């Protein structure tokens, strides 16, 4: 049976980071547990539930923002020591709140991830990994890309120390000491790691990973190579995974997989006879889930899933039924309990209203004082701007700790805003004067009450680059606004990959000149997404990319004084040539540019575009026919006289219109890419063919692949 879980909100702390809430071990089987949580105010709070009320066990004073919270202790004993990472410091507390450790790591960057195993401490900042034993430095590793999480296989079961780093370049790096033992490619940028079943599974080597694009997988980390066990693709297009735990919530004796996502989705996966995960329960919360734990918090013997959210809510999804069957005496007692609870809530509400009035008066006095400092209230924004491989669009997710009033989107580069099903905000567009002030888009999203999270989808055009700005205004007084900026890069639809097909016909662009490795790396960062900001270690670097819209490829190899870029799409090489020469001119660097154009690559790119263009043309034709076919159906009373093809269009009318609506300017985008390809092919030959573009568009309107290829060859 699927679990029936009821929601209980326990309390709210400050804004929380990923993996900053834990349940302390229970004193006996299925007894209530204490919850410990750290927030951005630097406060660590431990609380337990008593008679339906949250009571604090201890609460620390504010300090630097808490980035991680983990439990530790002597191996093979209950893990009830509380460790927190804040800035570059590690502090530790007993379960009663007494601080017994303050360790300054002297890391130059703030700690982003932490794992505790006995006396071993594994830390990572953005690019640096450190292993300490008894607070003494043991091992160090500098990663080529950002480290999102760190974990170590259970030492007590394997008698070896095997740390694993989850890195932004879609790789898990398995370490031995200060060296990489081997790398494991995963299907998306890994954001979180967890031991399967909490202990590494049957072998002690089973590791779970979750990615920022919502994929989930299990890998066995052996001493020689990885063994991929299973993987769950994100078919339902849900949010990225922020936290994972193992706990038997279904009650069948086998631990289930608990998953929390950044779109507020909580999922429970059970395992069938073949050890494959099956989704048994899901529930959406209104904001991203930063931590998830299975245990017992609200009442003895009732298991639950406890989650913390971005704005600091600690919420339980409990197996305790809301409506209880009871005798007359128990019913009276239950009613009395409810009355007491309502009375308590009323008192609390009155107290809060009084406090709000007081604070409002204080604010008025302080803002009118001659010595008043800026009294503009600050608020936290959790934002994410990522490229989706499935539909070649960017997701912009904005999450605020309080309700959003409106969001203004402004862009100085042409972009399309796509529909998002989850988005309930009302959008309105303002007219723009792109010629005089480079303003291509002005759109306002007005949010419904209590909306704290807004998701937008954006599609850019390669070769056109600039800045997208989001002005976020929350529902707080006095009115205040924060601006966030996002760079639309020249090759914005390219995504990092680990392999490319070297047999494809490639065009080559070679740059030489008096430039440093750091300079050429900064140009690549400017042109392409998913490239680490810091230059990788070594004298030479190779990056592979794939265009998410067309599936064309790009190889970039560069070192001090030389850069070589190869692509099967001439337009990609053309964009790189224009942008790189412009960037070098800005810095007064003299570049020698040479290129080799492979004529076969043009036909190859047209063949890649063909299925997409054919599908879009067919979709457009079908949508055009729908109204006429519906009129005929009303006139005749049935569809029996229609040929099967037309009957099928009528049956799928809603689906076809929805799909067409979801992809605005898709056909025009493909036309634009073919036109650019045509112009770029002849640009490298020194010929201007812009006068022939109208003829090309005529051929596209009555599209035939062979006619198009012939036109490219004959022009």
Image (cartoon, rainbow, N blue to C red):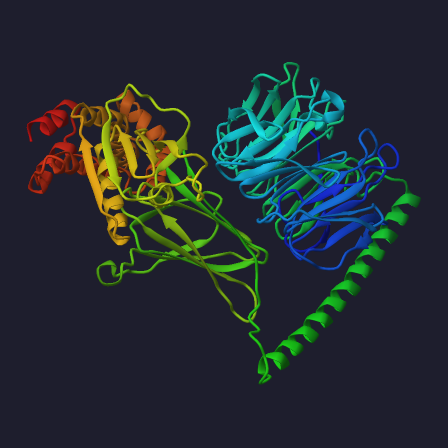
Residue 349 lies in quadrant = bottom right
Q: Which residue lies furthest to the top in this view?
A: 274
398 or 425: which is nearer to us?
Answer: 398
Q: Residue furthest bottom?
A: 370
- Disc tally is 0
Q: Which residue lies furthest to the front in this view?
A: 514
Q: Can residue 391 be seen in this view?
A: no
Please provide percent x and percent y for residue 20: 68, 45
Quadrant for the C terminus, please.
top left
683 relative position to 516: left or right:
left
451 or 331: which is nearer to us?
Answer: 451
Q: In this rendering, is residue 195 above or below 432?
A: above
637 relative position to 257: left or right:
left
Please provide percent x and percent y for residue 682: 11, 35
Residue that appears at 11% across and 39% down: 693
Q: Can residue 554 be seen in this view?
A: yes
Residue 275 lies in quadrant = top right
Quadrant for the N terminus, please.
top right
Q: In this rendering, is residue 223 above or below 385?
A: above
Residue 353 lies in quadrant = bottom right
Residue that appears at 49% across and 38% down: 145
Please provide percent x and percent y for residue 651: 36, 28
189 or 358: which is nearer to us?
Answer: 189
Please provide percent x and percent y for residue 423: 47, 47
571 or 377: which is nearer to us?
Answer: 571
């Amino acid at each position: 049976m699927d679990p029936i879980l009821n929601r209980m909100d326990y309390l709210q702390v400050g804004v929380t980071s990923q993996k900053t809430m834990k349940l302390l071990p229970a004193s006996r089987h299925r007894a209530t547990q204490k919850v410990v949580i750290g927030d951005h105010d630097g406060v660590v709070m431990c609380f337990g539930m008593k008679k339906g009320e949250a009571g604090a066990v201890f609460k620390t004073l504010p300090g630097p923002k808490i980035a991680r919270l983990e439990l530790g202790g002597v191996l093979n004993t209950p893990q009830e020591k509380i460790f927190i990472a804040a800035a570059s410091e590690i502090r530790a507390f007993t379960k009663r709140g007494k601080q017994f450790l303050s360790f300054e790591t002297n890391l130059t960057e703030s700690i982003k991830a932490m794992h505790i195993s006995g006396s071993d401490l594994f830390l990572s900042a953005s690019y640096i990994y450190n292993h300490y034993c008894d607070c003494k430095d043991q091992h160090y590793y500098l990663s080529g890309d950002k480290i999102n999480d760190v974990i170590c296989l259970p030492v007590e079961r394997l008698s070896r120390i095997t740390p694993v780093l989850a890195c932004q370049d879609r790789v898990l790096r398995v370490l031995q000491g200060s060296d990489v033992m081997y790398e494991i490619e995963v299907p998306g940028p890994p954001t979180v790691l967890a031991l399967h079943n909490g202990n590494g599974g049957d072998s002690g080597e089973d590791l779970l990973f979750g990615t920022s694009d919502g994929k989930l997988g299990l890998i066995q980390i052996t001493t020689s190579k990885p063994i991929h066990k299973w993987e769950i693709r994100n078919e339902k297009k849900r949010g990225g995974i922020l936290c994972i735990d193992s706990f038997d919530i279904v009650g069948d004796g086998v631990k289930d997989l608990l998953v929390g996502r950044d779109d507020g989705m909580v999922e429970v996966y059970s395992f069938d006879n073949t050890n494959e995960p099956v989704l048994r329960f899901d529930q959406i919360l209104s904001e991203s889930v930063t931590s998830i734990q299975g245990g017992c918090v609200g009442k003895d013997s009732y298991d639950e899933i406890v989650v913390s959210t971005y704005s600091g809510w600690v919420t339980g999804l409990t197996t305790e039924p809301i409506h209880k069957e009871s005798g007359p005496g128990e019913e009276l007692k239950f009613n009395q309990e409810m009355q007491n609870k309502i009375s308590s809530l009323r008192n609390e509400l009155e107290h809060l209203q009084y406090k709000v009035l007081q604070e409002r008066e204080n604010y008025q006095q302080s803002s009118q004082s001659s010595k008043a400092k800026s009294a503009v209230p600050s608020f936290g924004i959790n934002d994410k701007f990522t490229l989706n491989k499935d539909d070649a669009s960017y997701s912009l997710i904005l999450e605020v700790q309080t309700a959003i009033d409106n969001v203004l989107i402004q862009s100085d580069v042409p972009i399309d805003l796509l529909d998002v099903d989850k988005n309930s905000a009302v959008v309105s567009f303002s007219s723009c004067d792109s010629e005089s002030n480079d303003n291509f888009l002005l759109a306002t999203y007005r949010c419904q009450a209590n909306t704290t999270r807004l998701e937008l989808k954006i599609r850019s055009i390669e070769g056109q680059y600039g800045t997208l700005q989001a002005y976020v205004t929350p529902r707080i007084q006095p009115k205040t606004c924060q601006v966030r900026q996002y760079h639309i890069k020249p090759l914005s639809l390219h995504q990092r990959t680990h392999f490319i097909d070297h047999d494809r016909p490639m065009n080559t662009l070679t740059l030489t000149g008096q430039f440093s490795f750091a300079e050429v790396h900064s140009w690549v960062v400017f042109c392409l997404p998913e490239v680490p900001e810091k230059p990788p270690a070594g004298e030479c670097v190779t990056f592979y990319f794939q265009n998410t819209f067309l599936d064309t490829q790009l190889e970039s190899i560069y070192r001090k004084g030389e850069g070589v870029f190869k692509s099967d799409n001439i337009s990609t090489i053309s964009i790189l040539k224009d942008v790189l020469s412009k960037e070098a001119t800005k810095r007064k660097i003299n570049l020698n540019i040479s290129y080799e154009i492979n004529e076969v690559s043009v036909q190859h790119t047209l063949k890649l575009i063909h299925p997409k263009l054919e599908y879009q043309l067919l979709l457009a034709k079908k949508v055009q026919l729908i109204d006429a076919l519906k009129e005929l159906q009303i006139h005749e009373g049935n569809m029996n006289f229609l040929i099967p093809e037309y009957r099928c269009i009528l049956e799928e009318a809603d689906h076809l219109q929805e799909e067409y609506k979801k992809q605005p300017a898709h056909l025009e985008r493909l036309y634009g890419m073919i036109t650019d390809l045509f112009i770029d092919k002849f640009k490298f030959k020194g010929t201007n063919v812009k006068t022939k573009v109208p003829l090309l568009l005529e051929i596209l309107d009555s599209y035939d692949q062979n006619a198009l290829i012939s036109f490219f060859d004959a022009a």
